[in-house]
Image (spheres, helix red, strand yellow):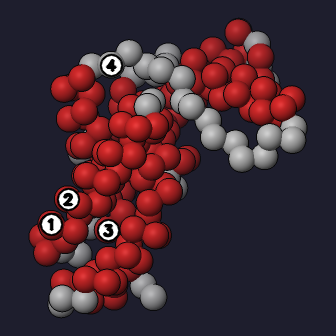
Amino acid sequence: MEIDEVIARVKNGEDHCFAYIIKHYEQKVFTTVIRIVRNRTVAEDIVQDIFIKVYYNLHKYEKKGSFNAWLYRIVVNKCFDYLRKYKQQARSIDMDIADGRYPEKILLLREKNEQLEQLLQQLDETEYFVLLLKFVNGLRYDEISEVLQISLNEVRNKLHRSKRKLRSIGTTKGGYFYEM
């Protein structure tokens, strides 16, 4: 089922179809939110608030842009609201890894994640969001432009600059990302 068809059905009163939207987008939205707020419990609450807002505002969505861009605009706004309200210091992500049979893999994965997070902290806010929306959420440049409300050229420039900056930092500091 196509997302536009699902949206149309929800708008026509078939509320049970909204579960498809949640199922389709929940993991990507959660990944985005937890990378921004860095707290699992808070991220879960924000994701729930996001889907409630999407449900109650779905009638406002028009096909002027993509649904992805419309949804991630809500995601980014909710995260900005949280960051503005609480201004918490970044905390490491609590990784849940179900398979406890390989503790060395868990340790290596945590180390790698910590190094990546340290590298990402070197970016400014917009560069961070451009990378996140592009590589974690798979948004197109035009969708990122719409979500962050910046020009298409600025998206390209921020993406190029942030990759170059990460590469430069990664080669000087060593670790997992030394040869990025």
| Residue at image location 78% in from the left, 33% down from the top | 106
Question: Which quarter of the rendered picture does the C terminus lie within?
Answer: top right
Q: Residue furthest top?
A: 172
Do the residues bearing badges 1 and 4 touch, measured as CB atoms within 8 Å?
no
Q: Which residue is mark 1?
A: 57
Which residue type does callout 3 highlight?
Answer: Phe
Q: Secondary structure at mark 4?
A: loop
Which residue type does callout 1 highlight?
Answer: Asn
Q: Is residue 151 visible?
A: no
Q: CA distance from mark 1 to mark 2?
A: 6 Å
Which residue type does callout 2 highlight?
Answer: Lys
Q: Which residue is mark 3?
A: 67
| Residue at image location 32% in from the left, 45% down from the top | 45
Q: CA distance from mark 3 to mark 4?
A: 30 Å
| Residue at image location 50% in from the left, 57% down from the top | 27
Position of residue 53 relative to residue 168, above or below, is below
Mark toward the start of the polypeptide (1 vs 3): 1
Mark toward the start of the polypeptide (2 vs 3): 2
Front disc: 2 or 3? 2
Do the residues bearing badges 1 and 2 touch, measured as CB atoms within 8 Å?
yes
Q: Secondary structure at mark 2?
A: helix
Crowd class of label 3 (few under 14; some 14 to 19; many from 20; radius 10 Å) = some
In-image side of 125 versus 95 (left or right) = left
Q: Which residue is mark 4?
A: 88
Front disc: 1 or 4? 4
Front disc: 3 or 4? 4
